[in-house]
Amino acid sequence: MKKIILFQLVLLLSIRALAEGAISFETRQVPVNRGGEDDGTVCLRFYSDMPSVPYISVADFQQLMLPGTTIEVTKTGKGKYLLEGPFAKATVNTTSEQFSSDDYMAFTNLMGQVQEGMDNVGFGGSPFLRYNHHEMTPASATVTFDFSKYGIDLRGDEKAVYFPFATISDIFSDMDFHLAGYNGEKVIVLTGDDDSDNVAKLEIERAKELLEAESREEDMAAFCYAELCFVIDHFYGMPGRSPLEGGIKNDGLDKTLDVIEHGPTIKKLLKSTNTKEYFFGMKSLQVLLQDGGHTNLMVDYNLFMAQAEEDEMEEYFYEEWKDSNKEFEDTYPYLYQPLMDLIEESMESSKREVISMYRPSTSDQTYYKEGDTAFLMYDSFGPINKEAWEEYYDNGCQGETPAIDEEYKGDLSVVLDALKQASEDPEVKNLVVDLACNTGGDFDVLMAMSVLMGGPNYYYSENLVTGQRQISYFDVDSNFDGVFDEKDKDVKYDLNIAVLTSDVSFSCGNFFPSMMQDMGFPIIGERSGGGSCAVHPFITPEGMQFQISSARDRLANKNWENIDGGVEPNYVIDVSSGDYSAFYDVNFINEIFRSRSLNPSGILSVINRGGTNVYYDLFGRKLANPAAKGIYIVNGKKVVK
């Protein structure tokens, strides 16, 4: 009799579960790899209708990403939940499949791992830099994600809310590489450290298995495509270079692929259960979203680079990587050839090599002086020699700051060396920061460098996710004594500083001249190469990494103009012939410095006076086409002839 009653009770519960739309699931305790170290387990759910796609409760995810914190969940109605995190609140509706927060950036803030109490903005945590605050306009904004548009199900019970693991990781991920992924065996937590910026590095053997797998499960393939569409629709920064941007903004990626040339084919590849076809689909989409280097959807390349030395990259692209895509040359030639062209273009360094040939120094030099003008040849912002800087600060900032290390030619030590040499040399009055071959790098170095040179300690950016403008402020330990205080403001270098750019100057190489120009420092050379968005990393539901230009931090100048189009120099040097000798002609450079000191206001007034192909000198006097070398105003721009 008891067995019959028990059976009836189980049957009743099953019927009730079906009536309420419940779906059966199994739970698994999955090992966690945190930044390369084993760190216990976490509970994942696998529902019967999507057996390959892991789910996690929001409370468990919060504890996973920011240990010691949690999210309190209260059921407020049928399918409705209130989520109270450590910094803000959110709501979830598992019926309409919506997530909403009046302070999304605070709710998803993981930056306390970098600096206690800081807001959710980018910062690498270098010891010589400290986040101060940011100003948001408007002060608050509501963000709502409607997952029903993507067929992504949010699930819940009486006590908890469950997101697909990849979905909640995507909405919490930040620009300092705090994110997590599930690779089919383990949960990998990236911690933002240098050795923890690529999920494949931490589980290299599993990464190889993913790279070599022949097929994918159908439910996983469908979910990967849905999640990719969600990420691109909400987090791609729209820098202004992709032909898809208008379509994505108005209709979303999925519908845009339906109407563009070859779009349906790319969608088919992205949804394919054949792994190679999926890889090729991501690479084909990369061609359409190419934005100079911040977006990289080539997941197989990222897996390879986790196990390769940097000098193996070219060999890989021209041998192994090209061979792995060879089968698509005949099948989809209209997709294959643009991809090969993109790779050829990205591997070319001829422009940098040409510019370098005109430099008055050898390739291993970072400082050069001629007369009263010195050059800081700076080809990359970072990476910093983090170990050396941390050791210096851990030892109480005793002795000299870290010296130049040949392995870290973009370190702040290179900048300090140039400033020291120039300021201690009684002959030197001018310092040119040569970014003509600079392709970007580390934000921390850029901000410290700006302050040390008399530039701003803040930057302007737009958050396209929230619709807010933001000004983010930082403090620099300018005297490197381990204390952020008023004494830092006493550090000044009595130098005239200008910035030299070319269209190679990308990312931070574009960001720095924009900041300095806003403060009135002269920019010389060619329009810089753009790159206005921060890099935003993501991990696919299968455990493969990619990155996009971030909508959370699209850089602007003081007029709130997107700077992806590059920074127009105050003094344009015509290099259309391929001759960059004027970049390093000290007489020309000195004429610029002299003209600014003699007639700074006159220069600005002349800019608007130039007619078509009419030459003016820097004092506004109209000239015939001059034969003499010099700086002139032509068509409203300063041109070196």
Image (cartoon, helix red, strand yellow):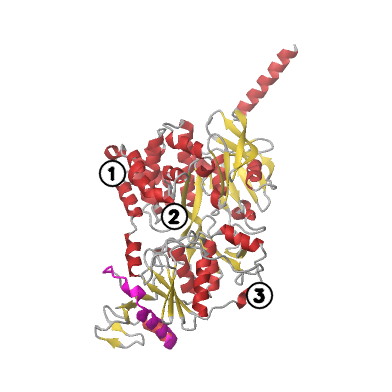
Foreground mark, 3 or 1? 3
Q: Nearer the viewer, residue 440 or 157?
A: 440
Q: How many marks?
A: 3
Q: Nearer the viewer, residue 92 or 361?
A: 361
Foreground mark, 3 or 2? 3
Q: Amino acid at mark 1?
A: Tyr
Give the side of residue 584 with respect to residue 413, left or right: left
Query: Which residue is disc 3 drawn over?
Result: 486
Taking the magenta stretch, the answer to whether it contains residue 499 is no
Whether residue 368 is visible here, answered yes or no, is yes
Q: Amino acid at mark 3?
A: Glu
Query: Which residue is disc 1 drawn over?
Result: 334
Mark found first going from the N terminus, 3 or 1: 1
Q: Position of residue 46 (x, y in %)?
A: 58, 31
Residue 291 is drawn in which quadrant? bottom left
Give the side of residue 188 with respect to residue 409, left or right: right
Mark identifier at residue 136: none
Dot 3: element = helix
Dot 1: element = helix
